[in-house]
Image: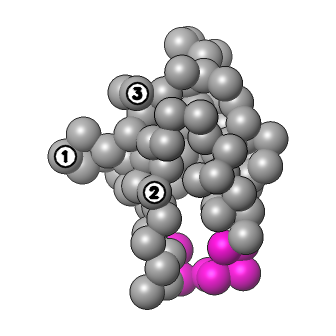
Amino acid sequence: MLTIIYNRKKCIGCSNCILVSPLYFTISKLDGKSILLNSIYKNGNYIRKSINNINYKYIEKAVKVCPVKIIKLIKY
């Protein structure tokens, strides 16, 4: 199982996460920041849990390319 934790408040809108992981991220037309798809808001972060580990490498890339390091990945 994977858990992705994303702090959207600190997003600078560089879109790197969208380029490497379009199945998980998209851009907001309202403010230009990334959106973690199918996530819930909890304690200041957006959280998405996934049973599917197949796309792990794409999320891992998003974590690495984020210049402000606001994407975290927990693998169980």
Q: Nearer the viewer, mark 3 or mark 1?
A: 3
Mark number displayed over residue 72: 2
Snapshot quadrant of residue 56: bottom right
Magenta residues, start to end = 50-56
Question: Residue at coordinates 59% horizontally, 34% vertically from top-left?
Answer: 67
Residue 51 lies in the magenta-colored region: yes
Q: Earlier in the sequence, mark 3 or mark 2?
A: 3
Name the foreground residue: 69 vs 54.
Answer: 69
Residue 26 position in % (x across, y down): 67, 37
Question: Residue at coordinates 64% horizontally, 61% vertically from top-left?
Answer: 59
Q: Are marks 3 and 1 in contact (CB under 8 Å)?
A: no
The mark total stands at: 3
Q: Is residue 11 above or below residue 44?
A: above
Name the foreground residue: 41 vs 74.
Answer: 74
Q: Is residue 32 above or below residue 44?
A: above
Q: Nearer the viewer, mark 1 or mark 2?
A: 2
Distance of label 3 from label 1 (alpha carbons): 14 Å
Residue 52 position in % (x across, y down): 62, 81
Give the labeled residue for mark 1.
43
Q: Is residue 49 above or below residue 32?
A: below
Give the labeled residue for mark 3.
10
Q: What's the amino acid at mark 1? A: Asn
Q: Are marks 3 and 2 in contact (CB under 8 Å)?
A: no
Question: Residue at coordinates 61% horizontally, 40% vertically from top-left?
Answer: 66
Residue 58 lies in the magenta-colored region: no
Q: Secondary structure at mark 3?
A: helix
Q: How many other residues sit within 10 Å of disc 1, few (<14), some (14-19) or many (≥20)?
A: few
